[in-house]
Amino acid sequence: GAVVSQHPSWVICKSGTSVKIECRSLDFQATTMFWYRQFPKQSLMLMATSNEGSKATYEQGVEKDKFLINHASLTLSTLTVTSAHPEDSSFYICSARSGLAGTTTAYEQYFGPGTRLTVT
Amino acid sequence: RKEVEQDPGPFNVPEGATVAFNCTYSNSASQSFFWYRQDCRKEPKLLMSVYSSGNEDGRFTAQLNRASQYISLLIRDSKLSDSATYLCVVNSFTTSGTYKYIFGTGTRLKVLA
């Protein structure tokens, strides 16, 4: 199957700093990438959907000014957690889909290995 | 009501047992369905897609009942390595005109020696 990488795999930062997480599709072009967050013992919650070259669509309750998403190329999307606080500590997972943006066909998503963020 | 509901478990079963997980979804316009497996502190990995006709992959059998909006996963001859959380995933059409995955909370399985 398709391979998606994330970097870093884990990060510890101090409260108030910003953290950038990269998501790359290694062997296919990802027209759409998704960012999820998972708290302990909970399921994955979609934060935002990004299509290459356009602004991300954020889910209700997710602050777009706090979680900055950039999808500048067909193989790279970044999530920046700005002014991180301890409550932002979580497991952040990206996924990538190769289907054409805006179509109604359901394409499979390929998940990255996740980034564990701890804010102290 | 949650869009995708699963019994969180845990299900503790002996090796060799058969175990079944169920999942219900609320959006009748959902298009595709999957079972993912997630190990502790890892990303979800696709176990199998679920088709209306039912499908089997080795010891795993998935069933979909669109009329009842119900999905199941059957694991036969459980192995210790099957211990994980099993996520029911529904790909649903949203009001914004896109498809997105909706995850259930997962069912924890522990296979005991």
Image: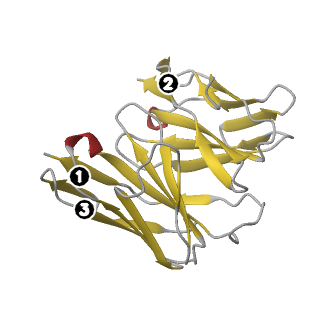
- Name the residue beneath numbered marker 2: B15
Count of all numbered marks drawn on residues in the image: 3
- Name the residue beneath numbered marker 1: A84
Q: Is residue A25 visible?
A: no
Chain letter of mark 2 equals B
The local secondary structure at tag 2 comes to loop
Split into 4 quadrants, where in the image is the N terminus of chain B? top right
Split into 4 quadrants, where in the image is the C terminus of chain B? top left
Mark 3: amino acid: Val
Q: Is residue B7 visible?
A: yes
Q: Is residue A47 above or below residue A79?
A: above
Distance from disc 1 to disc 2, alpha carbons, whole Å, reads 44 Å
Distance from disc 2 to disc 3, alpha carbons, whole Å, reads 43 Å
Give x and y (percent) for residue A71.
Answer: 48, 73
Crowd class of label 2 (few under 14; some 14 to 19; many from 20; radius 10 Å): some
B96 sits left or right of A67 in the view = right
Residue lying at 78% horizontally and 47% vertically, measured from the top left: B31
- Name the residue beneath numbered marker 3: A19
Give the residue at the far front of this rendering: A65
| Tag 3 near tag 1, CB within 8 Å | yes
Check chain identity for marks 2 and 3: say if they share one.
no
Give the residue at the far bottom of this rendering: A73
Residue lying at 44% horizontally and 47% vertically, measured from the top left: A62
Distance from disc 3 to disc 1, alpha carbons, whole Å, reads 7 Å
B113 sits left or right of B51 in the view = left
Chain letter of mark 3 equals A
Mark 2: amino acid: Glu
Counting residues from the start of the chain, the first of labels 3 and 1 encountered is 3
